[in-house]
Amino acid sequence: MADQVTLSATPRSEFGKGAARRLRRAHQVPAVLYGHGTEPVHISLPGHETLLALRVANVLLEIDLEGGTKQLALPKQVQKDPVTGFIEHVDLVVVRRGERVNVQVPLVLVGEHSTEVMIVMDQNTITLEVEATHIPEHVEIDVTGVSVGHNIAAKDLTLPEGAVFHGEPDDLILSAHATPSQASIDAELDAASGSGAEAPVAVTEPAASDQE
């Protein structure tokens, strides 16, 4: 199950780019908390703690608001600076204990297989309906001993207790292929680079001699 992390939150009343920049300079993250028909609550969160918490997929957050109010929430949208990676804004959706939600859960390979087999992932996550307070951190796929030509579909996965998959049972998750030889890799690289074609030759015109 994904971790639950408590974050202290401070209400904010200033908005706009200038206010957001001031918050970030103070190592705070602007955020909004909404859901279940409640009015959106604009808050700021501690930057470093929020960054660490959101490294976990589908982390359940307990937002500790000033005044002693606590609210469970899931990250809905996270905006990051493309250069620094610092979190610029977070949308949080309110959840309640016992409520079921749809989340994307990472797929993780476990086990060992022959070096002659190459695993090709068709999906890296799977959408599951789970309890908001029991979101699995990941779903494991055991590839021990898989052979070339073997496929694993959604129906073959062992899902965590209580999790429901609403997609097609035959949705392809991964397939096993023969590991390409170095010769075939080199041939593909040669074909892609067009090494069989003659390279163009640059011709320089001779300078005309001076004649008086």
Image (cartoon, rainbow, N blue to C red):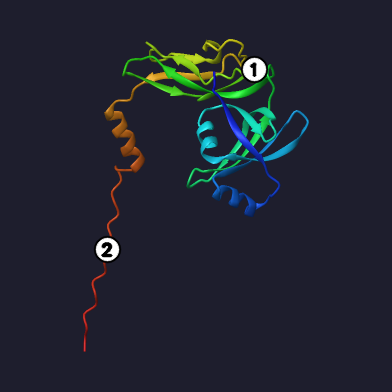
Query: Please, what is the three-letter code of the amino acid marked with disc 2?
Result: Val
Q: Position of residue 170 (x, y in %)?
A: 57, 15
The quarter of the picture where residue 100 lies is top right
Q: Is residue 81 left or right of residue 144?
A: right
Given this view, does label 1 or label 2 mark the residue nearer the observer? 1
Answer with left or right where residue 38 lies relative to residue 60. Answer: right
- Residue 163 horizontal/vertical position (percent): 60, 14
Q: Residues within 10 Å of mark 2 (few under 14, many from 20)?
A: few
Q: Residues within 10 Å of mark 1 (few under 14, many from 20)?
A: some
* Element type at mark 2: loop
Reply above or below: 1 against 49.
above
SS of the residue under disc 1: strand
Of the image marks 1 and 2, the number of the one nearer the N terminus: 1
Which quadrant of the structure image shows residue 32?
A: top right
Quick one: 27 or 208, which is closer to the camera?
Answer: 27
Of residues 140 and 198, the one nearer the viewer is: 140
Q: Residue at x 34, y 43 (%)?
A: 193
> Residue 184 versus residue 58: which sits nearer the camera?
58
In front here: 192 or 173? 173
Q: Residue at x 47, y 19 (%)?
A: 174
Q: Residue 9 at x, y = what percent? A: 63, 37
State the residue position of label 2: 203
Residue type at mark 1 is Glu
Q: Is residue 209 left or right of residue 26?
A: left
Residue under label 1: 131
Which image quadrant is residue 72 in? top right
Write the residue at 21% across / 89% down: 212
